[in-house]
Image (cartoon, rainbow, N blue to C red):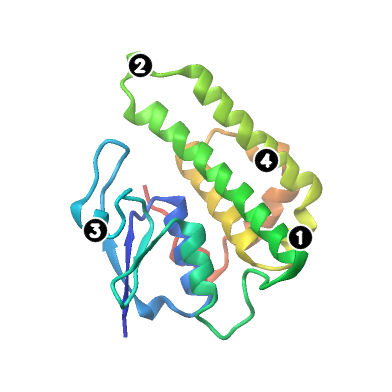
Amino acid sequence: MATMTLFHSPLSPFVRKVMVVLHETGQLGRVQLQAVNVSPVAGDDQLNRGNPIGKIPALRLEDGHVLHDSRVICEYLDTQHVGLPLIPRQGSARWRRLTLASQADAIMDAAVSTRYETFLRPADKRWDGWVEAQGEKIRRSLANLEQEHLAELISGFDIVAIGVACALGYLDLRQPDFGWRDQQPGLAAWYAEVIKRPSMVATAPVA
């Protein structure tokens, strides 16, 4: 039975990350989905209750408290199931995985910022230098994943792999000409297999 409410926008990569965690941990049935349509200049009154900054995703718990930020929500959900944890519980491995998960989130942040700048901002006010800087952040991060962390991604579908997969999916959705596969063939091969997972298929965005 659904005891929590997830405020979401289906095209958000951060929302997708939470949805993949729900699928992977068998908790989808505990959550009722509440779609909201928000942007940097338009909020939602229901979303703002208990979440004054208006962030999505936001998870309203059974007791009425609201968790926001995908990292917080994913960590909470990871403590609510009996399977293998997606985030190491302690030690250096925990901080290493959380740091890499943050890197995946930063790719999403840069991609979403680019979307806002190129789609929502009036054409005469767009800042090309900003867009170029976001693209460089993404390219550096993907190169780092390819060169230094590919073996870790291949080793299991944990919180890092989920974040990277959702980030790549969002790039394909919003910047299909970004060309990351040409520069990161190992990452591309890994992603081609990962997107076959039921959790990724079920959460695939449709523009």
Residue underneath mark 4: 141
**Which secondary structure lies at badge 4?**
helix
Q: Position of residue 112 (x, y in %)?
A: 45, 39
Tell me the tag on residue 125.
Answer: 2
Residue underneath mark 3: 49
Q: Determine whether, in the image, residue 43 is placed left or right of residue 83.
A: left
Dot 1 or dot 3: first in sequence order is: 3
Q: Determine whether, in the image, residue 56 is placed left or right of residue 24.
A: left
Is disc 1 in contact with disc 4, using a CB cutoff of under 8 Å? no
Q: Amino acid at mark 2?
A: Lys
Mark 1 crowd level (few <14, some 14–19, many ≥20, 10 Å Cα)? some
Distance in Å between CA atoms under marks 2 and 4: 28 Å
Q: Position of residue 138 (x, y in %)?
A: 61, 37
The quadrant of the rendering that contains the N terminus is bottom left
Distance in Å between CA atoms under marks 2 and 3: 32 Å
Dot 1 or dot 2: first in sequence order is: 2
Mark 4 crowd level (few <14, some 14–19, many ≥20, 10 Å Cα)? some
Which residue is located at x 27 percent, y 36 percent? 41
Dot 2 or dot 3: first in sequence order is: 3
Q: Quadrant of residue 194?
A: bottom right
Is disc 1 in contact with disc 3, using a CB cutoff of under 8 Å? no
Residue underneath mark 1: 152
